[in-house]
């Protein structure tokens, strides 16, 4: 899973960029104030993603545990899309382990199972459907 970008924690929002061979854009993640105010459902995104002032996606806070199951950590499940892109971008955003004010954007390939269920989060490769 390659790192395709980085964000910086600006206090009230995250700002940074995505750089790939075919895409270069500035990205800003701002809290979804409608969700915070209870206007939308709990399934609504925690953050809205903007580039050049245009909303291009959203991010949801997820919690996972490490391999031993002792420590829980948060990450963002990021989904970006634009009518001119050949496909949407799904990524996860983690805090950088060296500098807590920096976050890494890591691209994830959408699996056929995730693409068919409407989820923006790909299913783990070794998981089984229940």
Image (spheres, grey):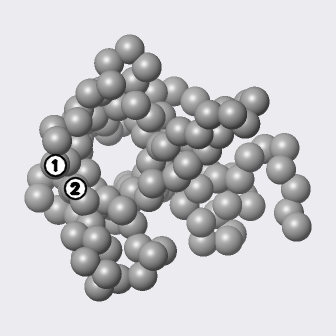
- In the displayed structure, does residue 50 sit left or right of residue 90? left
Q: Residue at x 26, y 66 (%)?
A: 32
Q: Position of residue 61 (x, y in %)?
A: 45, 54
Q: Are marks 2 and 1 in contact (CB under 8 Å)?
A: yes
Q: Position of residue 90 (x, y in %)?
A: 49, 50
Q: Residue at x 64, y 53 (%)?
A: 122
Between 27 and 72, the one lying in front of the other is: 72
Residue position marked by numbered label 1 in the rendering: 12
Q: Earlier in the sequence, mark 2 or mark 1?
A: 1
For the N terminus, the image quarter is top right
- In the displayed structure, does residue 114 sit left or right of residue 29? right
Between 68 and 92, the one lying in front of the other is: 68
CA–CA distance between discs 2 and 1?
7 Å
Residue position marked by numbered label 2 in the rendering: 30
Q: Does residue 4 appear anywhere in the picture?
A: no
Q: Position of residue 79 (x, y in %)?
A: 43, 56
Between 38 and 48, the one lying in front of the other is: 38
Helix or strand or loop: what does disc 1 sit on?
A: loop
Q: Position of residue 96 (x, y in %)?
A: 40, 24
């Amino acid at each position: 899973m390659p790192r395709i970008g980085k964000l910086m924690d600006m206090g009230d929002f995250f700002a940074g960029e995505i750089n790939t061979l075919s895409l270069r854009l500035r990205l800003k993640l701002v809290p979804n104030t409608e969700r915070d105010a209870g206007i939308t459902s709990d399934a609504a995104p925690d953050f809205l993603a903007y580039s050049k002032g245009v909303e291009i996606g959203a991010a949801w806070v997820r919690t996972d545990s490490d391999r031993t199951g002792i420590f829980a950590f948060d990450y963002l499940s990021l989904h970006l899309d634009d009518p001119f892109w050949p496909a949407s971008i799904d990524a996860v955003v983690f805090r950088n382990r060296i500098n807590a004010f920096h976050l890494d954007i890591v691209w994830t390939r959408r699996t056929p199972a995730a693409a068919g269920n409407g989820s923006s989060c790909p299913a783990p490769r070794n998981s089984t459907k229940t």
